[in-house]
Image (cartoon, grey):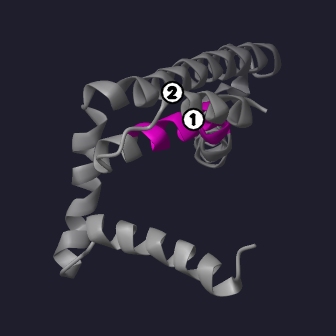
Amino acid sequence: METGNERRKIVMMSPQLVLEYSVMFSPLDGFFLPFHGLRLIFKPGIRRFVVVPVVLNIVVFALLAWLAVSYFEHVMGQYLPENTWWSFLRPLMWLVFAAAYALAVFYGFTILANLIASPFNGLLAAKVEQHHVPARIEYSMIANIVPANIV
């Protein structure tokens, strides 16, 4: 049976390993950490777990933008025809639509992007850990991660 001290020793080993690989010596080091992450994206084993969610997000948001613009154009043509005296409101309505769409994308992107990318996050974390930590991660471990992320 494991005592509390043994359990604490096991937990204490993990942060030491993390600190060994992520020591920041100055605030300037913290500034360059995102650029270090961008270098990791272009590694062959990691690239596909980043590219697939990004491409899916681009496709989904392009389709949503096309659908919103075509629907708004139809509504504008039906309720605010061009040949009437109030056609001067059309550019103002397009500005209101653009602002509303920008707000919807701003708030909706985080939710939708996380939903699309969530099945890939566990695999991406496993590949990055495999890149940083010399010990090999077995494919059986990755096979256990996939069902947990999909559900």
Residue 3 counted in the magenta span: no
Q: Is residue 91 above or below residue 66?
A: below
**Residue 106, how many percent across, how many down?**
58, 47
Q: Is residue 95 above or below residue 47?
A: below
Q: Is residue 117 above or below residue 129?
A: above
* Label 1, residues with CA under 10 Å away: few <14, some 14-19, many ≥20: few
Image point (48%, 22%), residue name: 52
Where residue 87 is drawn, which disc sits there?
A: none
Q: Check disc 2 and report the residue beneath it.
A: 139
Image point (52%, 34%), residue name: 123
Q: CA distance from mark 2 to mark 1?
A: 5 Å
Q: Secondary structure at mark 2?
A: helix
Residue 119 counted in the magenta span: yes
Q: Which residues, given as a range, are shown in magenta? A: 112-127
Q: Can you tell which quarter of the image residue 115 is in?
A: top right
**Residue 22, how many percent across, how many down?**
30, 67
Q: Secondary structure at mark 1?
A: helix
Asked if the residue at tag 1 contacts the one at tag 2, i.e. Cβ–Cβ closer than 8 Å, the answer is yes
Q: Amino acid under label 2?
A: Tyr
Q: Is residue 120 visible?
A: no
Q: Is residue 79 left or right of residue 145?
A: right
Query: What is the chief secondary structure element of the magenta stretch?
Result: helix
Q: Check disc 1 and report the residue beneath it.
A: 141
Q: Is residue 136 left or right of residue 90?
A: left
**Residue 36, how many percent across, how many down?**
23, 52
Q: Can you tell which quarter of the image residue 63 is in?
A: top right
**Residue 5, how many percent across, how many down?**
62, 86
Q: Work out whether residue 120 or residue 90 is closer to the camera in this orientation and state it.
A: 120
Which image quadrant: the N terminus? bottom right
